């Protein structure tokens, strides 16, 4: 019996397999999806389905080792919760180039399409989707095709993306702490001024000086302001 999938069906199965790979599934066929036959894609999809159905009790954001029970935890399980990870997506530059050309052909049909350069198969991207709609991209490029394993590229790209996500979250945490740290730093000076000078004094603090000023006269008006 001949297996024939429509382009929409192939896309749906590829997306499903990619989701499984993001959770630790390892492909049976080390081929780009565009080079897989419909039979191979069917078998790969079936294995991905089995993977999902045997991993339902696992943590949603578990690392590869925790998912497959192979080796110690990679300390990436908690990171998923820490950064608000809700989705992971992988593709190579070659897959992106191929899809872009397919999309372009739908708009501007032409008899000849330039072949995708081989080195683009060595560049892998990992896209992390975080809560709030934030997207973080990690990348990895393998030096050559000798001993090439797409899983290695995906893991390295994921690690790169996780590091970027952690840096973003650390910066966000620092920004969130600024108001509290400013108040903590300001209170001693406010207390000193309340105890030592009258209310007409003002303190001006910069990164390298502290100046105490006393107001002798003050006149304010909004009469000359323009809208």
Image: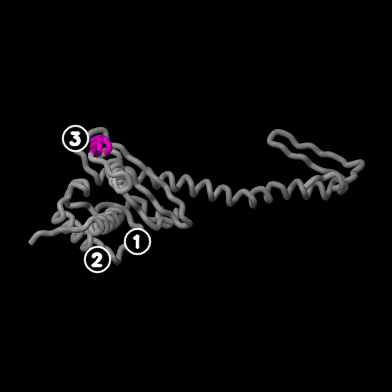
Tell me residue 42's x, y (percent). 17, 58
Bin the neighbour count of mark 3 within 10 Å (Cα to Cα): few under 14, some 14-19, many 20 and up.
few
Res 92 seen here: no
Start-end of magenta stretch: 112-120
Q: Which residue is mark 3?
A: 146
Tell me residue 87's x, y (percent). 37, 56
Element under label 2? helix
Depth check, mark 1 against mark 3: the one in front is: 3
Q: Are marks 2 and 3 in contact (CB under 8 Å)?
A: no
| Residue at (36% x, 51% y) in the render | 75
Element under label 3? loop
Q: Which residue is mark 1?
A: 60
Q: Which residue is mark 2?
A: 53
In 3D space, how far apart are the residues under numbered discs 1 and 3 (Cα atoms)?
34 Å
Q: Quadrant of residue 20?
A: bottom left
Tell me residue 201's x, y (percent). 85, 44
The relative height of residue 74 versus residue 143 in the rendered view (above or below) is below
In 3D space, how far apart are the residues under numbered discs 1 and 2 (Cα atoms)?
13 Å
| Residue at (40% x, 58% y) in the render | 86
């Amino acid at each position: 019996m001949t297996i024939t999938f429509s382009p929409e069906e192939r896309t749906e199965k590829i997306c499903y397999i990619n989701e499984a790979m993001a959770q630790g599934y390892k492909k049976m066929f080390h081929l780009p999806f565009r080079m897989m036959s419909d039979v191979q894609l069917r078998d790969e999809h079936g294995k991905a389905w089995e993977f999902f159905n045997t991993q339902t009790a696992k943590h949603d954001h578990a690392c590869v080792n925790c998912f497959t029970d192979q080796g110690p935890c990679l300390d990436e399980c908690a990171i998923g919760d820490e950064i608000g990870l809700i989705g992971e997506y992988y593709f190579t530059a070659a897959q992106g180039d191929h899809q872009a050309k397919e999309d372009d052909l739908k708009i501007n049909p032409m008899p000849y399409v330039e072949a995708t350069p081989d080195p683009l198969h060595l560049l892998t991207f990992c896209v992390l989707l975080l809560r709030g709609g934030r997207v973080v991209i990690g990348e990895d490029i393998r030096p050559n095709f000798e001993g090439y394993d797409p899983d290695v590229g995906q893991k390295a790209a994921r690690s790169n993306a996780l590091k970027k996500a952690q840096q973003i979250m650390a910066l966000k945490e620092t920004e969130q702490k600024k108001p509290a740290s400013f108040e903590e730093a300001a209170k001693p000076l406010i207390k000193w001024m309340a105890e030592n000078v009258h209310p007409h004094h003002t303190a001006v603090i910069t990164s390298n000086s502290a100046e105490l000023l006393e107001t002798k006269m003050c006149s304010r008006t909004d009469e000359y302001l323009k809208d």
